[in-house]
Image (cartoon, helix red, strand yellow):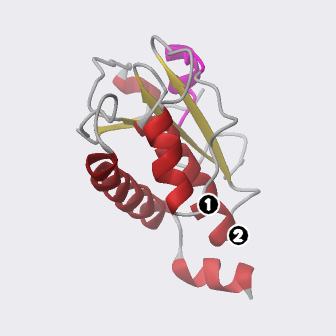
C-alpha cells in the first residue's frame, strides 16, 4: 500500500502502472461507457502495459442498459457482452484514480492516496437515445481529460510510432 507521499501512478515497488476505477451504483450505464472509452484511450495511447482499468458498482444491475449499448454501438464500441459487476472499497483503495459517475457516497481513507473525483453525470437509465448521446459525449471527454493528466503526449506519440 502506498503512503500519502507517493504520487499517482507510483508505488514503493517501483511499478509505474496507473490503476483507474470507474464506478457507479449499478455499473450498467455511465461506468460501462467510461470503461469502454478508457480501454480505447489506453489502446490509442499505447499504454496497455501501464494502465489497469477496473469497473464496478456498489449494487450491480442484471445487465447493461440497452440504450447505453445502442449509444456506444453508434461510435463503434460494442459493449453488448459486458455484465455489471460489484466493486469493493478495498479494490478502489488500490487505485491511483477513482471516478464516480455522480451517484456515489464513496468515502476512501485520504491516507490511501487515491485521487477520487465525482463526474456528476446524469443517469442514462430510462433516458432516450438523444439524452444518452449527450451523457456519452461528456463521459468520453472526461476520460480523455483523465488520461491527459497522467499521460505524457510525447511518450504516447513515440509508443504509437
Extreme bottom residue here?
A: 161
- Residue 78 bears which disc, if any? none
Q: Is any atom of residue 102 visible in this view? A: yes
- The vertical placement of 92 against 17, above or below, is above
Marks 1 and 2 close (CB-CB < 8 Å)? no
Residue appearing at x 29%, y 41% in the figure: 128
| Residue segment shown in magenta | 85-95
Image x and y of residue 148, in percent: 44, 67
The answer to if 12 sits in the magenta stretch is no
SS under mark 1: helix
61 or 88: which is nearer to us? 61
Residue 50 lies in quadrant? bottom right
Q: Nearer the viewer, mark 1 or mark 2?
A: 1
Residue appearing at x 47%, y 30% in the figure: 65
Report the number of discs.
Answer: 2
- Give the quarter of the figure containing the N terminus: top right
126 or 93: which is nearer to us? 126
Image x and y of residue 132, in percent: 33, 46
- The vertical placement of 39 against 44, above or below, is above
Image x and y of residue 146, in percent: 42, 57
Residue appearing at x 45%, y 14% in the figure: 58
**Mark 2: few/some/many CA within 10 Å (<14, 14-19, 20+):** some
Q: With 117 as the anchor, is 3 left or right in this view? A: right
The answer to if 91 sits in the magenta stretch is yes
**Mark 1: few/some/many CA within 10 Å (<14, 14-19, 20+):** some
Q: With 157 as the anchor, is 57 left or right in this view? A: left
- The vertical placement of 27 against 153, above or below, is above
Image x and y of residue 91, in percent: 58, 22
- Give the quarter of the figure containing the C terminus: bottom right
Residue topped by disc 2: 46
Residue topped by disc 1: 40
Q: CA distance from mark 1 to mark 2?
A: 10 Å
Amino acid at each position: 500500500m502506498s503512503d500519502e507521499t507517493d504520487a499517482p501512478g507510483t508505488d514503493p515497488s517501483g511499478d509505474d502502472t496507473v490503476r483507474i476505477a470507474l464506478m457507479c451504483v449499478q455499473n450498467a450505464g455511465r461506468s460501462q461507457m467510461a470503461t469502454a472509452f478508457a480501454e480505447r484511450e489506453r489502446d490509442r495511447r499505447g499504454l496497455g502495459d501501464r494502465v489497469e482499468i477496473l469497473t464496478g458498482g456498489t449494487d450491480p444491475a442484471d445487465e447493461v442498459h440497452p440504450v447505453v449499448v445502442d449509444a456506444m454501438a453508434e461510435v463503434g464500441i460494442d459493449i453488448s457482452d459486458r455484465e455489471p459487476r460489484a466493486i469493493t472499497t478495498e479494490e478502489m483503495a488500490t487505485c491511483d484514480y477513482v471516478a464516480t459517475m455522480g451517484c456515489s457516497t464513496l468515502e476512501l481513507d485520504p491516507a490511501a492516496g487515491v485521487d477520487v473525483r465525482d463526474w456528476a453525470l446524469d443517469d442514462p437509465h430510462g433516458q432516450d437515445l438523444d439524452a444518452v448521446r449527450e451523457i456519452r459525449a461528456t463521459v468520453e471527454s472526461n476520460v480523455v481529460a483523465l488520461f491527459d493528466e497522467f499521460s505524457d503526449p510525447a511518450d504516447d506519440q513515440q509508443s504509437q510510432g
